[in-house]
Image: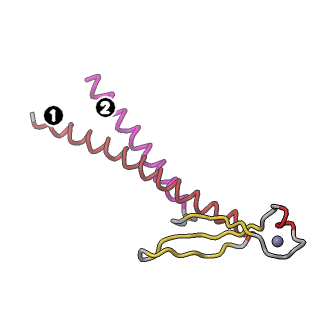
Amino acid sequence: MTSNKTDRRNIACLHRKRRTLSQRLGACKELVKGSLIVNRRRCGKPRCRCQEGQLHESYAFTFKKSGRSVLIHVPKWLEAEARQAQRDYRKLRALVDELSAVNVALLRNKARRSKTRRR
Ligand SMILES: [Zn+2]
């Protein structure tokens, strides 16, 4: 009986965890599957700061589309948004792994219970 009670408590805990994870998944809506890259270059003007090592930076987002790499320029003012998009995607992937583990535990539990029920 006690193990049954523990089982039920564990299952309730897993369901709670699943609810929380799915809510967090929904919060990753700004995701972009890709990478933000920073290009650093010299402009070629003779008296520019870049000649002394302070290179000009520009940002781009790369992602795959139909197997091909696509690159879009990201203006400086959109850098934070692009970083957030990248973070959201990584977060989503980690959440999917966590959610999958919870669902595996629930499946395993259901399978075990159905086995004991048939005995
Ligand atoms: Zn320059």
Q: Is residue 31 above or below residue 106?
A: below
- Which residue is identified by label 1? 116
Check whether the beta carbons of the residues at disc 1 and disc 2 lie within 8 A of each other. no
Q: Main secondary structure of the magenta part?
A: helix
Nearer the observer, 55 or 15: 55
Question: Which corner quadrant holds the N terminus?
Answer: top left
Q: Could you tell me the amino acid type at mark 2?
A: Asp
Separation of marks 1 and 2 at Cα, in angstroms = 13 Å
Q: Quadrant of ligand 1?
A: bottom right
Residue 7: give its label: 2
Give the answer, above or below, for where 12 lies relative to 100: above
Judged left or right of residue 110, residue 65 is right
Q: Quadrant of the C terminus?
A: top left
Residue 108 lies in quadrant: top left
Query: In the image, residue 77 lies at what x, y percent?
Result: 75, 69
User: Which portion, as a residue range, is magenta?
Assistant: 1-28
Say which mark, if any, is on residue 53. Answer: none
Chain-order first, disc 1 or disc 2: 2
Locate residue 82 relative to residue 98 in the image: left or right: right
Q: Position of residue 107 (x, y in %)?
A: 27, 45
